[in-house]
Image (cartoon, rainbow, N blue to C red):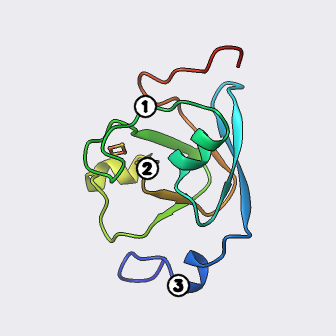
């Protein structure tokens, strides 16, 4: 991330980078590219994380990063500075920059058979 809080363009256009995203306590994992919001990647893997606005304003998808790094394409997503410092993220607009371990979002439902 640069001084303005935005990811450099070369990292935004690096769709071939793939990361493994795991949910805490042995929960399911999924693959996410560097160019795909985490929420979309989870849904493509058949998971059903809670979501509503899908643009970073409602906070329905909010969860915490326990390990790893994410970036945003917008300068200031709908999180308080204290929340960002504690690791809270909005997966609908967050992009993996490394392998990740996440907390379970509130109201997370696993699909039947998962
Ligand atoms: S779905 Fe609304 S903030 Fe992520």
Q: Residues within 10 Å of mark 2 (few under 14, many from 20)?
A: many
Q: Which mark is residue 50?
A: 1
The quadrant of the image that shows the C terminus is: top right
Q: Does the beta carbon of the residue at mark 1 sit less than 8 Å from ligand 1? A: yes
Name, please, the residue furthest toward the top. Answer: 112
The answer to whether 112 is drawn above or below residue 53 in the figure is above
- Against 99, residue 3 (above or below) is below
Q: Quadrant of residue 44?
A: top right
Residue 64, given in percent of the width and then of the height, sits at: 47, 41
Disc 2 to disc 3: CB gap under 8 Å: no
Mark 2 sits near ligand 1, with its Cβ under 8 Å away = yes
On the image, the x and y values in percent for residue 37 come to 52, 55
According to the picture, the residue beneath numbered tag 3 turns out to be 9
Q: Element type at marker 1?
A: loop
Q: Position of residue 28 (x, y in %)?
A: 69, 30
CB contact under 8 Å: marks 2 and 1: no
Distance CA(mark 1)–CA(mark 3): 29 Å
Determine the CA span between mark 2 and mark 3: 20 Å
Relative side of 112 to 16, left or right: left
Residue with the mark numbered 2: 92
Q: Which disc is residue 85 wearing?
A: none
Which residue is painted at 32% across and 52% down in the image? 56
Q: Which residue does the image show at 64% across and 14% down from the upper left?
A: 112
């Amino acid at each position: 991330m640069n001084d303005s809080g935005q990811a450099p363009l070369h990292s935004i256009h690096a769709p071939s980078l793939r990361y493994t995203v795991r949910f805490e306590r042995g929960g399911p994992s999924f693959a996410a590219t560097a160019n795909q919001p985490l929420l979309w990647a989870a849904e493509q893997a058949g998971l059903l994380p809670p979501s509503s606005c899908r643009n970073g304003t409602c906070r329905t998808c909010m969860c915490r990063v326990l390990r790893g790094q994410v970036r945003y394409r917008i300068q200031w997503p709908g999180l308080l500075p204290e929340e960002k410092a504690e690791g809270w993220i909005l997966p609908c607009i967050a992009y993996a920059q490394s392998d990740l371990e996440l907390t379970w979002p509130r109201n997370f439902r696993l699909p039947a058979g998962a």
